[in-house]
Image (cartoon, rainbow, N blue to C red):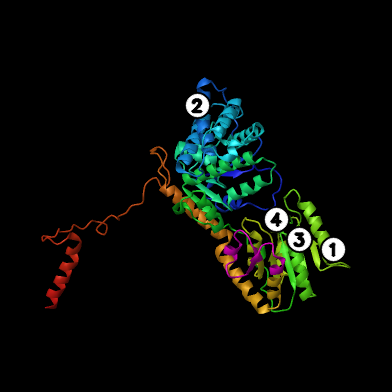
């Protein structure tokens, strides 16, 4: 099967911190042929020469861009008519780009700015849209041009593998990443599969909240992302959220429940399974592992450990991991080191900062193996990979309630509210004082992780999904090129077993559905007499 993998960010020669989940699909399903279409902010696959837009192209652009802009600014938000108008504008622009019109130039033109301003000033527009200014229009138009850039790329071959050569499009996120899949479904009828590890729209909202944008610009860009995500979910053949938390977000964005199927991410278990079972001892070592950044709330963990240290003077906290990818991660790590020095002054303190090359390496597995309790703090909304790794290690865990933590841990660990150091300390003390409970929870956590979150289970799920989607696709008849699953399976075997048995219609006025059972009962009574 030929699969077009639609991803964010082009591959580079740099070594990544860890393989992504779709990299494991490519490596673990060698029977399929994957072609990656990676989108990035710079030049990428498929850039092609376009002809200057003529008068007819400009008229078409004005009509379709008006529909798209009106759908973003109209009130109320989320109506069916609004979604239909956004779809009409988006797919109209896609048709225009396929006809070799220079869509990027049109999106950056003064006409686009005038059309966007007209939609914002129209009666019934959102209050935030009516407050837009010219600088805001420039920012919004620039972001729309970048987000809609995939429409103008050459996805259709011409010497390179294109969308017209794949049997299935698999997008790793909704939104601009899935635009190529929407094109393939529209122009070629190719099934579209959308998989999201976490709620992508929520991540967009959080990213925009930290960028220096005005309120009107932020509102218009959020409306665009929401409408594009809803269009992706509506057109997708199947959507596979990684967690129930992401599934709820997708349903609120318009995804049909019957086209949603939760597939948890697969986590490599090898180095963590080598850890021995937890021991019935009085060890008081706490381990935290992961990238140190503000979202991890390591400062809150240090304050919680101060309470633990008061109750258990011999307790030790190992913080395993270097600065994360956040811009202020290095400064936050320095802040946490200074906080540890203030909380535990004098000599070598009980807090050890251990920087590693990459979380998830055997060194992290070794750290988990030394833990009496693994503590995971923070308020991240993504999938808790570190929690699953601790479960593979057979260790009892204390986690903060964020994202998919509760559904991952089930009843095999303790969960406390995020941002509450006292609750975090109380849960850790409860496990440190009860070794038998730690052993029991650690064994249950390992069994749960092996049942639900292994890479093999993840690969098996997508192997079945790929075959299922292709089996239900309706390829165009092409007698010269046989395709798998182009014909349905036989429903009858040849021979006497598969031959149809003629039935004699009833002669009385008894309904046909009741004639058979009544006659069988009468024959039985006759034999009994």
Q: Is residue 469 visible?
A: yes
In the displayed structure image, the side of residue 313 where residue 204 appears, left or right = left
Residue under label 1: 341
Badge 1 vs badge 2, beta-carbon distance below 8 Å: no
- Residue, x 54% and y 50% (percent of image)? 195
Q: Start and end of the magenta stretch? A: 399-424
Q: Which mark is residue 268?
A: none
Front-lying residue, 282 or 166: 282
Q: Secondary structure at mark 3?
A: helix
Residue under label 4: 295
- Residue, x 70% and y 55% (percent of image)? 295
Residue 302 percent across, percent down from the top left: 77, 64
Q: CA distance from mark 1 to mark 2?
A: 65 Å
Residue under label 2: 60
Mark 3 nearby-residue class (10 Å; few <14, some 14–19, many ≥20): many
Q: CA distance from mark 3 to mark 4?
A: 10 Å
Q: Which mark is residue 299?
A: 3
Front-lying residue, 523 or 479: 523
Q: Secondary structure at mark 4?
A: helix
Mark 4 nearby-residue class (10 Å; few <14, some 14–19, many ≥20): some
């Amino acid at each position: 099967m030929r699969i077009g993998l639609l991803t964010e960010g082009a591959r580079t020669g740099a070594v990544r911190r860890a393989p992504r989940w779709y990299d494991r699909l490519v490596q673990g399903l060698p029977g399929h042929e994957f072609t990656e279409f990676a989108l990035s902010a710079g030049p990428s696959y498929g850039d092609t020469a376009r002809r200057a837009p003529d008068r007819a192209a400009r008229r078409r652009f004005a009509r379709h861009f008006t529909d798209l802009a009106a759908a973003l600014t109209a009130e109320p938000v989320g109506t069916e008519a609004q979604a239909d108008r956004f779809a009409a504008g988006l797919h109209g622009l896609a048709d225009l780009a396929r006809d070799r019109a220079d869509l990027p130039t049109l999106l950056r033109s003064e006409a686009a700015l005038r059309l966007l301003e007209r939609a914002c000033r129209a009666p019934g527009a959102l209050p935030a849209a009516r407050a837009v200014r010219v600088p805001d229009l420039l920012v919004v138009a620039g972001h729309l041009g970048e987000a809609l850039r995939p429409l103008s790329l050459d996805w259709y071959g011409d010497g390179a593998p294109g969308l017209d050569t794949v049997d299935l499009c698999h997008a790793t996120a909704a939104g601009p990443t899935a635009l190529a899949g929407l094109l393939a479904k529209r122009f070629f009828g190719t099934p579209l599969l959308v998989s999201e590890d976490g709620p992508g729209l929520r991540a967009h909202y959080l990213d925009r909240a930290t960028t220096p944008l005005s309120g009107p610009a932020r509102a218009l860009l959020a409306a665009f992302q929401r409408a594009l995500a809803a269009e992706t979910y509506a057109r997708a053949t199947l959507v596979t959220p990684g967690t129930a938390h992401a599934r709820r977000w997708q349903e609120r964005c318009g995804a049909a429940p019957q086209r949603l199927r939760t597939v948890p991410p697969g986590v490599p278990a090898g180095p963590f399974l080598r850890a021995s079972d937890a021991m019935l001892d009085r060890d008081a070592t706490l381990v935290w592992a992961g990238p140190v950044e503000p979202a991890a709330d390591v400062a809150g963990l240090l304050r919680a450990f101060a309470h633990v240290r008061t109750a258990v003077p011999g307790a030790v906290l190992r913080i395993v991991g270097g600065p994360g990818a956040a811009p202020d991660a290095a400064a936050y790590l320095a802040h946490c080191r200074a906080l540890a020095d203030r909380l535990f002054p004098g000599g070598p303190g009980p807090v050890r900062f251990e920087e590693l090359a990459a979380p998830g390496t055997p060194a992290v597995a070794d750290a988990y193996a030394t833990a009496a309790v693994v503590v995971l703090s923070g308020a991240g909304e993504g999938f808790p990979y570190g929690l699953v790794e601790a479960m593979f290690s057979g260790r009892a865990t204390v986690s903060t309630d964020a994202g998919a933590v509760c559904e991952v841990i089930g009843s095999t660990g303790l969960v406390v509210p995020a941002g509450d150091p006292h609750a975090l300390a109380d849960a850790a003390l409860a496990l440190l004082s009860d070794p038998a409970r730690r052993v029991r929870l650690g064994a249950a956590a390992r069994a749960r992780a092996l049942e639900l979150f292994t890479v093999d289970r993840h690969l098996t799920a997508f192997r079945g999904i790929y075959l299922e989607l292709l089996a239900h696709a309706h390829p165009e008849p092409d007698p010269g090129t046989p395709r798998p699953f182009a014909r349905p399976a036989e429903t009858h075997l040849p021979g006497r077993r598969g031959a149809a048995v003629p039935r004699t219609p009833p002669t009385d006025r008894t309904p046909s559905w009741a004639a058979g059972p009544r006659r069988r009962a009468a024959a039985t009574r006759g034999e009994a007499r």
